[in-house]
Amino acid sequence: LDLPLIVGILPLYNHRHASFLHNEVPGIRIPQDVMVRLEAAGGEGQHVGVDIALQLLDGLKAWAQGVYLMPPFGRYDMAAEIIERVRVRA
């Protein structure tokens, strides 16, 4: 079956957000190294979340035909930053 794969990315906002997703949402697992990075970032966790989203995008390039972003808590600025940084790289 030759169907395009469209991947959804939810940038992590901070350690608390990642913890909630990991512990309360079935099927979502946040790796320990990501949790450590977010915890170390403190109040700047959204920047780490954007960086992680960009790393995921880099890894998906080879096999995903598209992506959609789901900004956490209406933080469209995070989605805009991801889009802008992808444009700069292109």
Image (cartoon, rainbow, N blue to C red):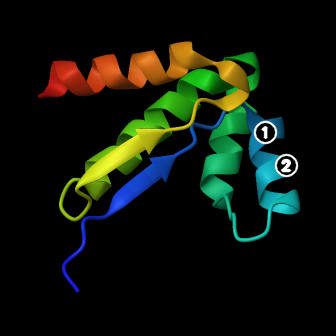
Crowd around label 1: few <14 · some 14–19 · many ≥20 (10 Å)? some
Tell me where residue 53 appears, x and y as whole percent.
Answer: 46, 40
Q: Which amino acid does label 2 sit on?
A: Phe
**Tag count:** 2
Badge 2 is on which residue?
20
Residue 37 image-quadrant placement: top right
Quadrant of the rendering where the N terminus is positioned: bottom left
Disc number placed over residue 17 in the picture, else none: 1
Relative vertical location of residue 78 with respect to residue 65 in this rendering, above or below: above
Residue most extreme to the bottom: 1
Q: On the rendered structure, is 22 left or right of 45?
A: right
Tell me where residue 9 appears, x and y as whole percent.
Answer: 50, 46
Q: Which residue is drawn at 57% across and 42% down?
A: 10
Q: On the rendered structure, is 57 left or right of 90?
A: right
Q: On the rendered structure, is 71 left or right of 53?
A: right
- Secondary structure beneath dot 1 equals helix
- Secondary structure beneath dot 2 equals helix
Relative vertical location of residue 4 with respect to residue 55 in this rendering, above or below: below
Q: Residue at x 70, y 71 (%)?
A: 27
